[in-house]
Image (cartoon, rainbow, N blue to C red):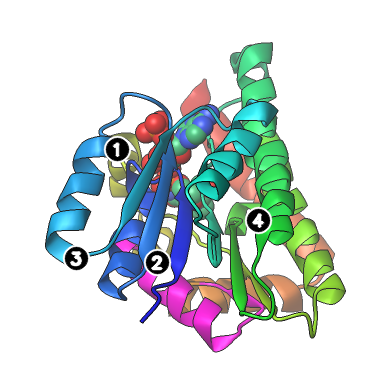
Amino acid sequence: MIRQTAMVTGASEGLGKSFAFELAGRGMNLVLVALPDTGLPDLSRFIRINFNVQVYVYETDLTVAKNCEAIFEGLSALGVSVDMLINNAGLGNWSWFADKPLSFYKTQIDLNITGTVLLTRLFLEQRQRPAKAYLLNVGSLGGQFVVPKKQVYGATKSFISYFTRSLQLELSGSGVQVTLLSPGGINTKPELLVLNHSLKGLSAASILEPETVAREAIRGLLKGRKEVVPGMLNRVMLLLDHLLPGGIKKLIIRQKLKVILKQHN
Ligand SMILES: NC(=O)c1ccc[n+]([C@@H]2O[C@H](COP(=O)([O-])OP(=O)(O)OC[C@H]3O[C@@H](n4cnc5c(N)ncnc54)[C@H](OP(=O)(O)O)[C@@H]3O)[C@@H](O)[C@H]2O)c1
């Protein structure tokens, strides 16, 4: 049996690591990508031994365009083609616009937008027809709700949403399944664990573990869903967002902003 191969970007930790375990558990060979010196070789060894799958590792910076090309050139030289691309690597933040330097926003846009577009283009180019191919782009509920302190991050995720939906139209009937993942809060790293722990009520209840998000996302991708919003509560909040009149939503956001400003001052 020829095993299928999945590429996961940002696989060293957080949601990407959970994707790697989920896909290895389904018997897929893996191409794992993350920045250098983030434990990727150890992770790949662990997965190889415990799941008996092939794991290829690329420790590289996806904000550099030629690095994205080099990954696919390297795989082609090994005779490996990628059947599934999980565009997961992303840089988030929760801060006032003036508080981050120019270099931060440049990196955020290069990784969240440019890296995703380039890898998607390269992935589609190398796909082996007529075999089915799978593309999962990791967006965020943050790309759908307009909130303060997520200005550039939210905008990059709105880009991912538009990009993915447009590709779904272009690629319909082509044998490429394209799915948008729109998660709410996920307990992926210590900073977020602390932040999420301070939440109350519905916000606290909506936070999910990365393993749950990865499982729901892959299930949705393989079932041919256009969008996966993990967690019932997040789906209800999204529905409310579609149903509520614009004026009421603005009022709610202004109230939230007042609370945030009070905490800030
Ligand atoms: N966490 C949440 O609450 C949440 C909610 C909604 C959506 N999301 C989205 O889910 C995805 C994963 O989030 P996460 O919380 O799991 O993030 P994370 O824990 O910060 O992991 C990000 C991954 O991306 C990699 N990465 C960062 N910069 C890179 C670069 N320049 N080149 C290559 N790889 C790079 C990191 O590698 P290193 O370890 O090498 O730095 C890491 O593996 C992101 O797209 C995020 O926007 C997250």
Residue 225 within the magenta-colored segment of the rendering: yes
Q: Nearer the viewer, residue 115 or 156?
A: 115
Mark 2 vs mark 3, foreground winner is: 3
Q: Position of residue 50 (x, y in %)?
A: 13, 61
Residue 106 sits in quarter: top right
For disc 1, the marked residue is 40
Q: Which badge, 2 or 4, is on the more N-terminal residue?
A: 4
For disc 3, the marked residue is 51
Q: Mark 1: is the Cβ under 8 angstroms from ligand 1?
A: yes
The reply to whether the C-beta atoms of the residues labelled 2 and 3 are less than 8 Å apart is no
For disc 4, the marked residue is 123
Give the residue displayed 36% in from the left and 63% down from the top: 29
Residue 182 is left or right of residue 226, and the answer is left
For disc 2, the marked residue is 213
Which amino acid type is shown beneath numbered disc 3? Phe
Residue 259 sits in quarter: top right
